[in-house]
Structures are given as C-alpha cells and as structure tokens.
C-alpha cells in the first residue's frame, strides 16, 4: 500500500497499525486431529505455514506458561499443515471457525494457554481511490458484520 500498489488490504494481526479499522476479533484455538494426543507431548510439536502471523505469539504464550514447544513442521501450504496435523504428530493454531472438518478444536481443560484473539483489520488509502457509490470498504464491512 505504501508503494501505491493496493487500495485496500485485509489482514489478520495480533497488533494492528494506527490507520486500520478493526472489523472483528476472532479467538485462536489449538486444533488437532480428532481425539488428538499430540497436544500432550513435550516439547509440544507445532505446525505453521512459513509466514504465519500467529507463530510468534503462540510460542511466546507457551513460553510464558512454561511449556516447551518446537516448530516441527513448516510449509508454504495450508493443506500440508492440515494434512500433517490430521495425522496427529503436531498441533496448530487457527482462528475459531476456520478449522477444516477433518480437524477439531482441542479441549485441553486449561492444560494449554489460550493462544489469543487476533484482529481482522482493513487498511485503505484515504485518497486516490476511484469514484464509486459508497466506500469500497462497505461490502467487506457488511460481510464481517454478518459473521
């Protein structure tokens, strides 16, 4: 956006910038294979996409709870992460409601810390947008309002 290549950016972030509009906060959940046993292992083995914004916060949250964790799987593909998690050697964090049907939120009974609640935010250039009826943000806002 700073280079002028984008007019709007939709992000999911733990820490948002000052020029954003927060549309929604969606809690993260630890997810695993149905009946997962992987979440009980120590070090806790985790899987992340290469540029996952949740990784740093998840690891800090585990360290603060004195739980050793390690990134055991890193991939550029969400499907690879999901497939590996479904085999149960690792767990991952995902936004609540985003877990695919073959994975489930892990009920740890408080044994793992809450991984947080990132914000879904929209950033947009104030000037230079083409003239349109209403704001280009309106359909995005409306979509998130209905969730």
Image: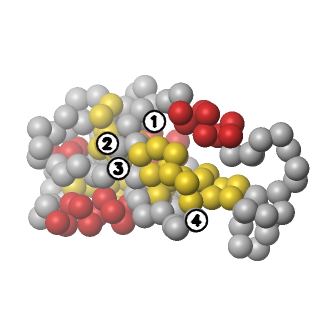
Mark 3 or 1: in front is 3
Q: Are marks 4 and 1 in contact (CB under 8 Å)?
A: no
Disc 1 crowd, CA 10 A, few/some/many (<14, 14-19, 20+): few
The residue singled out by tag 3 in the image is 117
Q: Nearer the viewer, mark 4 or mark 3?
A: 4
Q: Which residue is mark 1?
A: 98
In the depicted view, which residue is nearer to us: 96 or 71?
Answer: 96
Residue 43 image-quadrant placement = bottom left
List the single residue furthest toward the front: 134
Percent x, y for residue 90?
Answer: 30, 48
Label 1 secondary element: loop
Q: Earlier in the sequence, mark 3 or mark 2?
A: 2
For mark 4, what is the residue? Answer: 19
Q: Earlier in the sequence, mark 3 or mark 1?
A: 1
Q: Residue at point 79% right, 69% down?
A: 4
Please state, as top left, top right, bottom left or bottom right, where the N terminus lies in the image. Answer: bottom right
Question: Which residue in the protein does label 2 denote?
Answer: 29
- Tell me how far mark 2 sits from mark 1, CA to CA: 10 Å
Say whether disc 2 or disc 4 marks the residue closer to the N-terminus.
4
Instruction: Point out the frontmost of discs 2 and 4.
Output: 4
Residue at (53% x, 33% y) in the render: 145
Q: Position of residue 10 (x, y in %)?
A: 61, 52
Mark 4 vs 3, N-terminal side: 4
> Is residue 85 shown above or below 21?
above
């Amino acid at each position: 956006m700073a280079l002028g290549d984008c007019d709007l950016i939709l992000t999911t972030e733990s820490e948002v910038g000052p020029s954003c509009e927060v549309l929604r906060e969606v809690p993260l959940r630890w997810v695993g294979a149905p009946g997962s046993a992987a979440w009980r292992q120590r070090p806790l083995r985790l899987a992340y996409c290469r540029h996952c914004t949740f990784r740093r916060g998840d690891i800090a949250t585990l360290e603060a709870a004195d739980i050793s964790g390690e990134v055991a799987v890193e991939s550029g593909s969400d499907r690879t992460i999901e497939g590996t998690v479904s085999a149960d050697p690792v767990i991952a964090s995902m936004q609540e409601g985003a877990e695919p049907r073959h994975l489930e939120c892990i009920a740890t009974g408080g044994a793992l810390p809450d991984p947080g609640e990132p914000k879904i935010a929209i950033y947009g250039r104030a000037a230079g947008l083409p003239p349109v009826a209403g704001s280009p943000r309106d359909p995005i806002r409306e979509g998130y309002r209905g969730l």
